[in-house]
Image: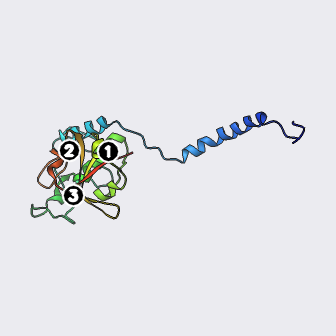
Amino acid sequence: MTEASGRAPARHRRPAAAVVLALLLPFASASVPVRPSVAPDRLVAVARAIQAGHARQGWEGGAIPYSWGGGHGERPGPSLGTCRGYRGSIRPCPAAGTLGLDCSGLARWVYHLAYGRDVLGPGNTDDHLRRLTRVPAAHARPGDLVFYGEVSRRRVRTHHVGIYVGQGMMINALRTGTEVRTDPVTRIEDFAGYFRYL
């Protein structure tokens, strides 16, 4: 005790504060969501295996056809598509009878397999983009997602996504009548940017 204040010196109070902090720290950190990181090469390896037709969770193997709305079932992975909103050139719409993936269904499945959980969630390219962070083109790395359409502060209206695999190439499900394949990032004209799950 000090004579002037009648309180114990500060050095004796610090251990009590440290104990309180140690007890509260687990609760504080438990409330902060932590996103596990996945090495970019893991994302690319999964995308390449799918493109090569290797068997994966939810797929017995073989080339995966494009199917409008495919990959948006309750669980990520190939599913029957839908003809709702279909604007493709192949008529009648084959999606309702085609087990496959559309572009955002492919991205969702690749990220699900790489992360071990459905990190992109259901939805279309606009929904997925809102869960990601834009990356300058100079800092793009394999595993990032490449979006096409309009992305501004006021508006997000995208129509395509691919998995960037480096050297100006992406793996994507392009359109009805194709299979999951590799294309140049420049294959589609209205490039909107690279985005990363952080």
Q: Which residue is mark 3?
A: 81
Q: Which amino acid lies under the numbered mark 1 shown in the image of this protein?
A: Tyr
Residue 142 to residue 101: above or below = above
Residue nearest the observer in this picture, 166 or 70: 166
Observer able to see residue 183: yes
In the picture, residue 60 is in which quadrant?
Answer: top left
Element under disc 2: strand
Observer able to see residue 124: no
Residue nearest the observer in this picture, 134 or 164: 134
- Outermost residue toward the front in this view: 4
Mark number displayed over residue 171? 2
Picture coordinates of residue 160, whole percent (x, y): 22, 55
Picture coordinates of residue 173, whole percent (x, y): 19, 50
Element under disc 1: helix
Residue 68 to residue 60: above or below = below
Mark number displayed over residue 111? 1
The residues bearing labels 3 and 1 have C-alpha atoms spaced at a distance of: 20 Å
CA neighbours of label 1 inside 10 A, class few (<14), some (14 to 19), many (20+): many
In the picture, residue 19 is in which quadrant?
Answer: top right
Which quadrant does the N terminus fall into?
top right
CA neighbours of label 2 inside 10 A, class few (<14), some (14 to 19), many (20+): many
